[in-house]
Image (spheres, rainbow, N blue to C red):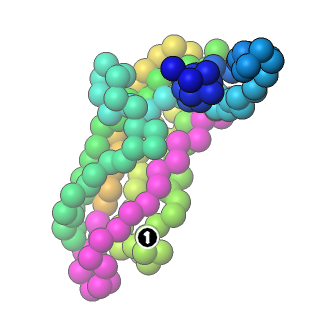
Amino acid sequence: MNKNLKAILLISLGIPLLTIGVYGATLSLTVHNSGYIGAVGIFSDINLTQPLANGNIAWGTVFPGTTLNQTVYIMNYAGQNVNLSMTVDNWNPLSASQYMSVSWDHEGMILAPGVAEACVIYLTVYDNATSSGISGFSFDIVINPTW
């Protein structure tokens, strides 16, 4: 195998610092790494194996005058109590927020360190939703843990 090809292969595996011999010379390469440290994790299952971060809740077809619910599980990874709050952003179309609302049963709740809780998210579709002309929608639910 060509030594240059080995270097490309090893870099793609994410080795942070790599020294390679190329025709008798030494070449050092640095691979940048980044990430986020989260205080809470959000999961779709009680065993906390299916994270919802960067995922989605598929509400399917919704009907005027109904409230749907979805249970999610929130785990506190912080070393201290966190206060939970939720906001809804990025309505698409923007007018969808006039015909439906999102809430949950854990607003203002305090979650202890190392504890996972089942939380229910509610999507309420108002009676006048059919007059909106909206055929599809999307939005982001943002869980805001604070200390």
- The residue sitting at 36% across, 47% down in the picture is 56
The answer to if 87 sits in the magenta stretch is no
Under circle 1, the secondary element is strand
The quadrant of the picture occupied by the C terminus is top right
Which amino acid, mark 1? Asn
What is the crowding at mark 1: few (fewer than 14 residues within 10 Å), some, or many (at least 20)? Answer: some
- The residue sitting at 43% across, 21% down in the picture is 116
Q: Residue furthest front?
A: 23
Percent across and percent down for residue 117 are 40, 25
**Residue at which label 1 appears:** 92
Q: Quadrant of residue 3?
A: top right
Percent across and percent down for residue 13 are 54, 24
- Tell me if 68 is positioned left or right of 9 in this view: left
Q: Quadrant of residue 38?
A: top right
From the viewer's side, name the closer residue of 31 and 62.
31
The answer to if 145 sits in the magenta stretch is yes
From the viewer's side, name the closer residue of 135 and 110.
135
In the displayed structure, 116 sits above or below 42; it is above
In the displayed structure, 132 sits above or below 23; it is below
From the viewer's side, name the closer residue of 62 and 7.
7
- The answer to whether any part of residue 5 appears in the image is yes
In the displayed structure, 11 sits above or below 132; it is above
- The answer to whether any part of residue 119 appears in the image is no
In the displayed structure, 85 sits above or below 92; it is above
- Tell me if 38 is positioned left or right of 127 in this view: right
- The residue sitting at 56% across, 23% down in the picture is 2
Percent across and percent down for residue 132 are 32, 83
From the viewer's side, name the closer residue of 136 and 81.
136
Q: Quadrant of residue 120?
A: top left
- Tell me if 93 is positioned left or right of 142 in this view: left
Q: Which residues are magenta?
A: 125-147
- The residue sitting at 72% across, 31% down in the picture is 32
